[in-house]
Amino acid sequence: MAEKMWPRMQAWARRLRRDAHALFLAARDRRTPWPARLLALAIAAYALSPIDLIPDVIPVLGYLDEVILLPLAIALVVRLIPPALMVEHRAAAERAAARPRSRAGAVAIIALWLAALALLGWWLWPATPA
């Protein structure tokens, strides 16, 4: 039973991620009604943000927003967006997820962070004369 549940949960999580991206795209589309645009932007920003309403360090309640509140909010906003428009944005989100990731970009970002840390270390701990 558990081995059948895991793939379903993974598929559900992928759909949530895709819908969060699709909501972001819908929020930027002028064809989306303005109340739905505002809610879609807020929900997409919250879904993609590292900051949580309920911190994850709180046992059980910490994951309440990711498991219950966020999917409910996404479902609500999806109902406010015209279905044809949502299909279009879901397809665009799928295409974006299928694009290859740039390893060179990741290496550049890591190099920038390492350079910033080295500069910070040099600034905080100046060399002492011998």
Image (cartoon, helix red, strand yellow):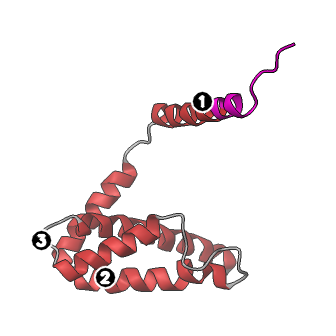
Q: Residue at x 59, y 34 (%)?
A: 116
Question: Residue 43 placed where, x, y %?
Answer: 38, 75
Counting other residues with Cα less than 10 Å from the Cα at mark 1, is it few (<14), some (14-19), or many (20 or more)?
A: few
Q: Quick check: marks 1 and 2 in contact, CB under 8 Å?
A: no
Q: Name the residue under label 1.
A: 115
The residues colored magenta run: 118-130
Given residues 94 and 59, the one toward you in this image is: 59
The answer to whether any part of residue 82 appears in the image is no
Q: Which of marks 1 and 2 is in front?
A: 1
Disc tally is 3
Q: Name the residue under label 2.
A: 77
Q: Would you say residue 9 sits in the magenta stretch?
A: no
Q: Which residue is drawn at 44% across and 42% down?
A: 101
Type of residue at label 3?
Arg
Q: Which residue is drawn at 18% across and 78% down?
A: 34
Residue 128 shown left or right of residue 95 in the figure: right
